[in-house]
Amino acid sequence: MKLAYPSPTLSIGLDTLSKVVADTLRKKHWHHFREGTVKLVYIPVYIFTYDIFVEENGVVAMEQSGKVAINGESGDLLEYIPMVLEEMPIEMTNEPKHDYQMEVKDFVISKEEAKELAQIKLAGLLKVPKDSIKVVGGQKIFWPIWRVWVDVHEGNYRLDIDGVTGMVFGAEKVPERELGWYEITQQVLTELRTPKGWIKYMNKLAKLLHVPPIVVYIIFFGIVLYLIYIIITG
């Protein structure tokens, strides 16, 4: 399928996608889940160039230039896309080099509306007056996003995975699963294999007892020394 506007080459395939989803849910302690609908969507994006010039009391307080991306369907600010385009070696093409079925979204917002939104959102983000921002350009591109619906015990959730970087959006909506006693015990024993783990739990104990951590350290090392003395003296 040929796109009306260029798009970056897809870097995240279905095989990598499954791992990204599993790793994301594992951080929320979900090891058992069901992956539902998977959809590859190309979202419309405007890329603008902006200049900011702020003067206070006759002195230049801020001068900045850069690029800003606006979702041409929702009007959302896509902060990461200009950085990706600048820092990653990305090939742009009108003909995606994959065989996946895909849905191409339309530009709902006009270029002038997107330009206005870019000014407003940059002003709020950078805490500067809107009138101090000049936005020009308006290159149209498409950006690949995987939309994955997953079922966990708490319900059904959608994760958006960037098809270029693998960044995950929407994970904050997935609740963390409460660990069972067996899992908690395993986690604690694993952490106690290192000095860092002992310090972590001694600090937690000090906080629980409302005493300075040094008090817990002294008691702990006192017990260790006593046990060593008992072992040595028989």
Image: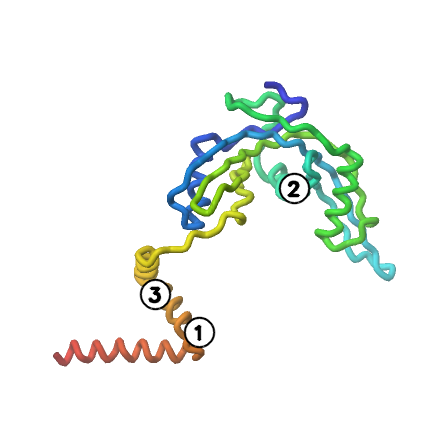
N-terminal of the pair, mark 1 or mark 3, is 3
Pick the residue in front: 139 or 203: 203
State the SS at label 3: helix
Q: Is residue 61 above or below residue 30?
A: below
Q: Is there a contact, CB below 8 Å, between mark 2 and mark 3?
A: no
- State the CA–CA distance, disc 2 to disc 3: 42 Å
Q: Which residue is mark 3?
A: 195
Front position among marks 1 and 3: 1
Q: Position of residue 231 (x, y in %)?
A: 16, 76
**Residue visible at 77% across and 39% down?**
115
Query: Please, which residue is most extreme toward the right here?
Result: 58
Q: Position of residue 4 (x, y in %)?
A: 67, 22
N-terminal of the pair, mark 2 or mark 3, is 2
Pick the residue in front: 188 or 176: 176
Q: Quadrant of the N terminus?
A: top right
Q: Which residue is mark 1?
A: 207
State the SS at label 1: helix
Q: Is residue 205 above or below residue 41?
A: below
Identity, as a three-letter code, of the amino acid under mark 1 = Lys
N-terminal of the pair, mark 1 or mark 2, is 2
Colour scheme used in the picture?
A: rainbow
Q: Position of residue 95 (x, y in %)?
A: 59, 21
- State the CA–CA distance, disc 1 to disc 2: 41 Å
Image quadrant where residue 178 sits: bottom left
Q: Please rate how many residues cluster around mark 1, counting C-alpha atoms within 10 Å: few if below 14, some from 14 to 19, many from 20.
A: few
Identity, as a three-letter code, of the amino acid under mark 3 = Pro
**Residue visible at 70% across and 36% down?**
47
State the SS at label 2: loop
Q: Which residue is mark 2?
A: 78
Q: Which mark is residue 128?
A: none
Q: Position of residue 70 (x, y in %)?
A: 70, 39
